[in-house]
Amino acid sequence: MDMGVDVFQWTKPKSNNTHSCSVAGRRGQPKCGQTHSNLATLTWKRSFPNLDFTFSLHSPIISLILHFLLLLLLLLSTLCPVHSSQFTTHSIANQTFLPKEEFHKLRTIRNRLQQINKPAVKTIQSPDGDIIDCVVSHKQPAFDHPLLKGRKPLDPPERPKGHDHLSDLSENFQLWRLSDESCPEGTIPIRRTREEDMLRASSVSRFGRKKILRRVRRDTTGNGHEHAVGYVTGDEYYGAKASINVWAPIVENQYEFSLSQMWVISGSFGDDLNTIEAGWQVSPELYGDSYPRFFTYWTTDAYQATGCYNLLCSGFVQTNSKIAIGAAISPTSSYNGGQFDISLLIWKDPKHGNWWLEFGSGILVGYWPSFLFTHLGDHASMIQFGGEIVNSGSSGSHTSTQMGSGHFAEEGFAKASYFRNLQVVDWDNNLIPLSNLRVLADHPNCYDIQGGVNNAWGNYFYYGGPGRNVKCP
């Protein structure tokens, strides 16, 4: 808006005690001096050619009208300021249709997206709507870390002894691979993070991280997080392996999730908790849909300021060119129908001390560098397997978000979800069966767990549940 098109000027008789106010000149601002109360006449000249209006102020009504017009002009100049051509960044922000806070939020999001999304040599469109970017390996987010800058991914480490190296499952377990597209050698597939992903987040600054949680005995007890888990403790652990049944549980709202995973844990359950985590999850807030997705996580300070999901921060180094962390899993299991599980192994490389992740039997995904951790720099003190959900309590009753298949453990195979072939890695890099598995459900009327051992599955358990029901109101 250009307020300098019309020029208004007040003129007055010469007097020693007078007052003048002017909205003077193009893009000017009001200027006022002192006045004398018995001012007799005032002439108002508007810059139209050959026009000159003179009013007598002897009439109190006209005087009031003029004072009202003057106040109106001053008010308009305040509400509709005219800026000079030398705009500042702040004034540009004020010219947008967005409130200042929203403008700042969008700018923060776009800066973060530039950090997360690396230049791609190839882009693949997934059937589920994901965009997969093929990024040169040494340009992935991990190498933004000061201790990794200028380096390249490490060569494969020595596998644990007693580990079956024959792959029983190909890398084609994700929807994006159904198009027969793949990333070139020397690159890794990364699920692209988009603006709408970050706008869904409850906090942009903590996007890609778990909420800060109160802990009692395990990593995420409290704040509405509920578990049904099997765990071992009391020894030194250098890794763990399990086959995890994959389902697509119903999640009640976007601020809740349902996951099934392994935890490799060390430190106390205070601010120094170290964890490495991997499995599958349904998280509408993080991914924008209800597909189960392969994921990883890590933290070294109890989820406060370190760590993240997948590749959303510098940390996990991916070495595989055919698996996209965070991408949807296909197929999934069906009730009283076909069953599908994924085998995951996490272990500490005896030579370099890094924690590696393997999918199936022999497919390396990548590693967490040992320098990321404090307590896990040496070994783990607890291994945990099982399910976790978030109960936000938004409806005033317990959530109906499902864990596992959404059915209780007692229903058994093809109906309840399971973990099987539970193993740990010992100090000598041997993969061995569990000897003292304990099972625990935070709220057994909502989600429960039942363990067992047999020749075919070794150590196993069924777990899960529907959430809200007659016994879980």
Image (cartoon, rainbow, N blue to C red):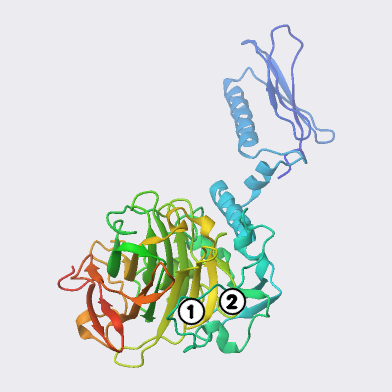
Residue type, mark 2 in image: Asn
Q: Residue at x 50, y 76 (%)?
A: 159
Which labelled disc corresponds to residue 5? none
Q: Earlier in the sequence, mark 2 or mark 1?
A: 2
Secondary-structure class at tag 2: loop
Residue 172 image offset from top left, x and y in percent: 53, 86
Residue 196 image offset from top left, x and y in percent: 54, 65
The answer to whether residue 164 is left or right of residue 15 is left
Which quarter of the image is occupied by the C terminus? Answer: bottom left
Residue 4 image offset from top left, x and y in percent: 76, 38
Q: Residue at x 67, y 62 (%)?
A: 151
Residue type, mark 1 in image: Phe
Which labelled disc corresponds to residue 320? 2
Q: Foreground residue, 449 or 394? A: 449
Q: Foreground residue, 201 or 146? A: 146
Q: Residue furthest front?
A: 428
Q: Is residue 232 visible?
A: yes
